[in-house]
Amino acid sequence: MSKELRRTPIWKLNKFIEDHILPDSTFLTEVKADIEVISAFLQERCFQGAAHPVRVSRVMMGGSYDEHTALKGRSEANMVVFFSNLTSFEDQLKWRGEFLEEIQKHLCQLQQERQFKVKFEIQSSEQQDCRSLSFKLSSPELQQKMEFDVQPAYDVLYELRNYKHLERDAYNEFYARLIRECTTLNKEGEFSMCFIDLHEKFMRDRPPELWNAIRLVKHWYQLTALNQTD
């Protein structure tokens, strides 16, 4: 496949992408249906009836989740679980381990209770102080799978979503405060998933040519990684 890509002229790239890189549309439809079930389940179950003050406020998807940048064969996606009543990045760091345990507990329950459209597998991790947990949705018949990295997050953009009338200076001060907080914690880049809304909006507003360019880069990366393991 890598040789075929190298030999493909520019004017034939769209055909190459259509034949070799675009994901199966049936698989994407089934994955989206299952993700809706998983997201709703987490919102309904996490910490419900517990003394813990936080709850899941919403779930956002990112990475190669949808038709914009998903690949044929294997894709990687992000599931960001936003919790209410967090007031800082420091809160996210403090409670991350407990949030991950709660999410994993309910994913295991859901795995036993629900029949999914595609195969649902929770990935175990042996790492200490893990920042996320993972699960996989796959279809052996279609030779397609999508691996999800689940991360709990502080809903840092809540204020901006609910106060759209803020002046530009207020926006600037808001982001300056966030940068100061990350710098103080010495955790620059640690909280990128908190801004997944901005990333997904940017991608939705881009032309298909950019989506295909990203697909090509991801495809090439996968081929390179595969060649290094051979």
Image (cartoon, rainbow, N blue to C red):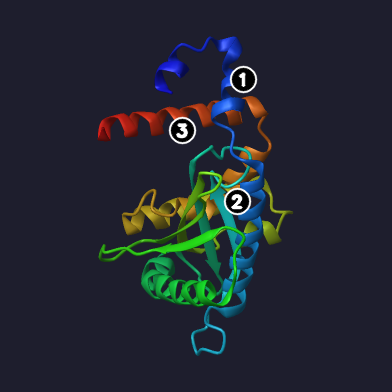
Question: Residue at coordinates 46% horizontally, 28% vertically from top-left?
Answer: 217
Mark 2 or mark 3, whichever is nearer to me: 3
Whichever of labels 3 and 1 marks the residue nearer the N terminus, that label is 1
The 10 Å Cα crowd at callout 1, few under 14, some 14 to 19, many 20 or more, is few
Query: Which sits earlier in the primary sequence, circle 1 or circle 2?
Result: 1
Viewed as shown, does residue 185 lie left or right of 56? left
- Residue wearing tag 2: 197
Q: Earlier in the sequence, mark 2 or mark 3?
A: 2
Q: Dot 2 surroundings within 10 Å: few (below 14), some, or many (20 or more)?
A: few
What residue is at 26 percent from the left and 32 percent from the top? Answer: 230
Residue 32 percent location from the top left of the image: 64, 55
Tag 3 secondary structure: helix
Above or below residue 207? Residue 68 is: below
- Most extreme residue toward the front, as rendered? 141
Q: Are marks 3 and 1 in contact (CB under 8 Å)?
A: no
Res. 218 mark: 3
Position of residue 107 measured from the top left corner of the image (x, y, whole percent): 49, 71
222 to the left or right of 128: right
Residue 209: horizontal and vertical position, in percent? Answer: 63, 24
Q: Please, what is the three-letter code of the amino acid marked with disc 2? A: Asp
Q: Position of residue 23 (x, y in %)?
A: 59, 38
Q: Nearer the viewer, residue 114 or 160?
A: 114
Type of amino acid at the residue the image marks with label 1 = Lys
- Label 3 is placed on what type of residue? Lys
Mark 2–mark 3 distance (CA, rounded to whole Å)? 21 Å
Q: Which residue is mark 1?
A: 15
Q: Nearer the viewer, mark 1 or mark 2?
A: 1
Q: CA distance from mark 1 to mark 2?
A: 31 Å
Give residue 220's quadrant in the image: top left
